Image (spheres, rainbow, N blue to C red):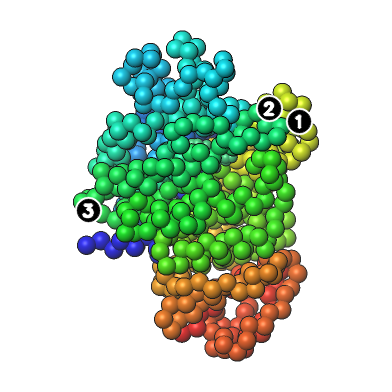
Amino acid sequence: MQDREWFKSAVVYQVYPRSFADGDGDGIGDLRGILQHLDHLEALGVDVVWLSPLYRSPQADNGYDISDYQDVDPLFGTLEQLDELIAGLHERGIKLVMDLVVNHTSDEHAWFQESRSSRDSPKRDWYVWRDPRDGGEPNNWGSFFSGSAWQLDEPTGQYYLHLFDRKQPDLNWENPEVREAVHAMMRWWLDRGVDGFRMDVINFISKEQSFADAPAVVGQRHVDASSLFADGPRIHEFLAEMHEAVFAGRDGAFLTVGEMPGVTPEEAVLYTDPARHEVDMVFQFEHVSLDQGPASKWDWIGLDRVALKRSLHRWQVALAERGWNSLYWDNHDQPRAVSRFGDDDPACWADSAKALATILHCMRGTPYVYQGEELGMTNYPFRTADEHRDVEAVNHWKRVIAEGLDQRSALTGMAKVGRDNARTPVQWDASAQAGFTTGAPWLPVNPNRSWLNAAAQVGVEGSVFEHHRALIRLRHEHAVIADGDFTGLLENDPEVWAYVRTLGSKRLLVVANCSRRARALELGDGWTGARLLLCNLADRADVLHDGALTLSGWESRVYLLE
Ligand code: TEU
């Protein structure tokens, strides 16, 4: 019998292959590069690696547009190298989770080629095809990547649905053949030795079949229609069926993570209630949406730390009894954590990266470390539109130009929240290309590589890397972190982030000062005798004598009372 809850004390590390490490000098990260850095992952102490897509793909959305689910793109290497990676990670006690992108395929996938070949194709119904309405798009749904979510296929006279880029047509999950094909592909990967899947926008696969217009928004021709396709009518049925067809009866400790934009805590409990056999945990978006204005994700309105804290605390409470959450500050779709939620001024950068990590890793849920986050990597100093490579930003800029929108605010938005911030090469050392490649990198290396890099941190006491390593060790060692109850403190304080975890007679106190100025705190007598487990400053007393303490700017501490 496997321990079904092993993932509660686990930490996941996300690798975005294109930007991790380049083993062949073409400027694009690859499997050989990943294989060269397994010791880094082992040193950090992570339990699982989630690999962003490296399947065959025309790379319209950096691999989230897949043309063959059962092969590696030559850009990244070979299936044999992937086998080598699985073996290399397993030898180190690390699991490998693949990205499962099955809301859509690439338009170059054989399934879509067949589907678009004629209206009578046996695979026509594998995708979502609709007749024109009044000579135009079938409804007013907008794509996440600007413009309409529909693309006309001239030879057959119908439109196909693409919630993302036009090169990412949505599969029709109503068709049981589609579901069976996906299940078979998943089983093939498990047979190959992978340990589970991170499921891309998986709460979008069951669409409202009326395909009615979404509520109109003044001034917008194409609108956000997520209420008509997120958490749709058959989503729980599809996930339970997938679990049954792929995982049931299989021996092993697998991980399933549902990436679910817009998911509410109430829905998340249903998705992750172990008794329902859907997914192990959700990846929710509430806390990474708070600095977005009403117009779009590009409408950056700045951070409200109290709102951020309340949001994360609300999720802690909502999933206290049933369900499980992923804990993350950033990933390949988000700006860098320390630039967005911390303070990337070189004077505070390290302490704020450590404080953020402390806050995240001691919560209830499974923490995710996105490549470079363990080093405190920052946003890139983007200034012009042509520095961006990401399809989302590129399409947005085209729209800004075409519609005559304000260019200055668009550039600010792109610099603040553009996805390429997370996609610049991992900074391994101080050399010109940061040890990422011997060639010309596909996205420039952040100039701060001269002082912000792995070589300057791994094994160096007090570094951001070593702080992450210590936090991961704490989760492994202390059941109160993996499984304790959560109580938020000082919830209206815009600077100090504090909470308590409790398991039996053990109590864990986490305090972090999210500001540059020192802050005095009075926690009461209840904490006398608490032992300091972790701090980002070296000279702090080992034991708390009373509940009074003063935190320096961006200082964080973890205490245990047993
Ligand atoms: O992202 C889902 C998603 O809705 C957003 O994060 C999206 O990328 C965008 O930032 C919205 O403004 C997943 C993948 O993580 C992302 O890389 C893909 O582009 C997307 O799905 C399509 O597969």
**The N terminus lies in which quarter of the figure?**
bottom left
First reached walking from the N terminus: tag 1 or tag 2: 2
Residue 70, x across and y down, in percent = 32, 32
The amino acid beneath tag 2 is Arg
Q: Mark 2 highlights which residue? A: 399
> Residue at the top extreme?
155
Q: Is mark 3 within 8 Å of ligand 1?
A: no
Q: Is residue 124 left or right of residue 525?
A: left
With 251 as the anchor, is 416 left or right in this view? Answer: right
At 52% from the left edge and 61% from the top edge, which residue is drawn?
315
Q: Which residue is mark 3?
A: 251
Q: Which residue is mark 1?
A: 405
Residue toward you, 83 or 437: 83
User: In front: 281, or 132?
Assistant: 132
| Tag in front: 3 or 2 | 2
Pointer 2: residues within 10 angstroms few (<14), some, or many (20+)? some
Q: Quadrant of residue 107?
A: top left
Q: Can residue 259 be seen in the rendering of this structure?
A: yes
For the residues bearing labels 1 and 2, Cβ distance under 8 angstroms: yes
